Image (spheres, rainbow, N blue to C red):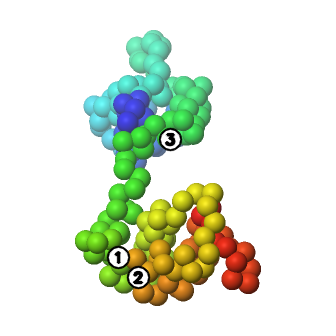
Amino acid sequence: MSEELVTFFKALAESNRLKIVGLLAEKAYSVEELAALLQLKPPTVSHHLARLTEAGLVTSRAESYYTVYQLDRKVLEEKSRSIFSQDELTSVVAEVDVDAYDQKVIKDFTRRDGSLKTIPAQQKKLEAVLRYIVKAFEMNKRYSEKRVNEILSRFHADTATLRRELVGYGLMKREGGGGDYWRV
């Protein structure tokens, strides 16, 4: 996961920092002004500003005796755009095992020989089991209903339900009137 992404969200994951961002979106403030507005101690405000600066959201400049802070709107917009890009969101989940849920459901609902103990009643679990079962069928190959039933009987005796659900969930197609079935 991108450290920049974590730093950005950590910087905004505190209510006082969000208030500071909101105030700085209106105009530049010093630590003392922000402390008075938020009813916080100046060291606390300085800590929050440091986190926001670390994330690149806030810049500072000397003005007379004070350091004045302002929101860098351009950086905020840029970070928001890049963080929520499809590439960034995809990279965040790169190390997540997207099949973990299916594997858990299959483990819970199958015996050692791969047959089903029962057909799940819950939709999400049924979908996971159907994705498991459909792998028994080759892509681009047509099967007679009799052959489909033979294959499905390895999983469960209720082949009609499995057949209907595989078609219903769009994992297989069939020709009307008892025609061929094929994996989609």
Q: Earlier in the sequence, mark 3 or mark 2?
A: 3
Q: Amino acid at mark 1?
A: Ser
User: Which residue is at a point 60% across and 70% down the rendered structure image?
Assistant: 143
Measure how far apart labels 1 and 3 are at the Cα level.
37 Å
Q: Amino acid at mark 3?
A: Leu
Q: In the rendered view of the protein, which quadrant contains the C terminus?
A: bottom right
Of 109 and 50, nearer the camera is 109
User: Which residue is at a point 29% across and 68% down the rendered structure image?
Assistant: 107
Of 68 and 127, nearer the camera is 127
Location of residue 31 (image quadrant): top left
Q: At which x and y percent is residue 20?
A: 45, 38
Of 95 and 159, nearer the camera is 159
Instruction: Determine the secondary structure under disc 3.
Output: helix
- Mark whose residue sits in front, 3 or 2: 2
Location of residue 163 (image quadrant): bottom right
How many numbered dots are placed on residues in this image?
3
- Mark whose residue sits in front, 1 or 3: 1
Give me the disc on residue 115: 1
Q: For mark 3, does the 10 Å Cα neighbourhood hold few (<14), some (14 to 19), or many (20 or more) residues?
A: some
Of 73 and 156, nearer the camera is 156
Instruction: Determine the secondary structure under disc 1.
Output: loop
Q: Give the residue number, with chain letter if any, for mark 3.
A: 89
Position of residue 159 in the picture relative to residue 183 (left or right): left
Q: For mark 1, does the 10 Å Cα neighbourhood hold few (<14), some (14 to 19), or many (20 or more) residues?
A: some
Q: Are marks 2 and 1 in contact (CB under 8 Å)?
A: yes
Q: Amino acid at mark 2?
A: His
Q: Give the residue number, with chain letter if any, for mark 2.
A: 156
Q: Residue extending furthest right?
A: 176
Q: At which x and y percent is residue 34?
A: 42, 35
Q: At which x and y percent is residue 126?
A: 46, 75
Position of residue 181 in the picture relative to residue 79 (left or right): right
